[in-house]
Image (cartoon, rainbow, N blue to C red):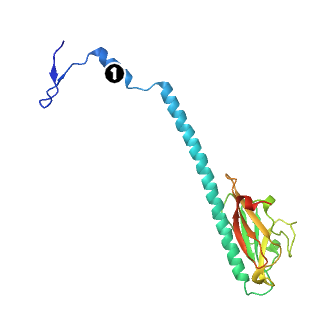
Amino acid sequence: MGKMKYKSNQDERPVKKIGRRQRRVKTGQSGHTLLELLVTLTLITILLLIGLSLLSRLLAEIRLNTATFELSQHWKFTRFDATGSGTTPTTLCMKDDGRIEVAKIASDDCETVSEWQSLTAEVGIDTANSTLRRVSGVGGNNGTIYRVSWADTRGGLGGSWGQLGRLTLTAQGTTAKRCLFLFRVDGSWDIREDNRCQR
């Protein structure tokens, strides 16, 4: 048999000396094959790509929600300023020159505006699904600058002045839509999502 060795004084069980041949077999079993490593790397790559895609879509929806919130605040304060200020409309002008820009004026002639305030980047106006007026006056869609106006009208203080409709927003990286919808002559408006923002 071979010489017996003891591990320590505390452990009285005998331990056999391991031979060279046994050592080689044991060492060979502890490694990984090239195929196993390639499969593992492939799975990690797939999971990372899925994760990055989800993250990209999530960030796009965050940008869209942020821009919607910013624009809703402009709508709210424009209507507030128009309430009780007479029959001259207070208008929020909105355009998309690669980035949504807004300007509040005390008329409805948006073409004369020189100072614009930019909203969140990579969010644009969906012109196919936006129905707010784009001309000076109470109605029409032949221009390039969208506008929403409020004034003291027959609809009430801070009532809608001009054409009702919606402004639909989209963001790069997501199919989601958000829209601000001016839907009553009393000046009421709300925020809608996705299918409720289409014609």
Q: Position of residue 137 (x, y in %)?
A: 86, 76
Q: Quadrant of residue 130?
A: bottom right
In the image, residue 135 sits, relative to residue 199, either above or below, namely: below
Q: How many marks?
A: 1
Q: Is residue 102 left or right of residue 7?
A: right
Residue sitting at the far top: 1
Q: Which residue has dot 1 on it? A: 26
Report the residue at 70% width, 70% height from top.
Answer: 190
Q: Amino acid at mark 1?
A: Lys
As helix, strand or loop, the secondary structure at mark 1 comes to helix
Report the residue at 50% width, 33% height from top.
Answer: 40
Report the residue at 63% width, 51% height from top.
Answer: 57
Q: Is residue 195 left or right of residue 18?
A: right
Asked if residue 98 shows in the view, the reply is no
Q: Quadrant of residue 99?
A: bottom right
Q: Is residue 198 left or right of residue 27?
A: right
Say which quadrant the C terminus sits in: bottom right
Say which quadrant the N terminus sits in: top left
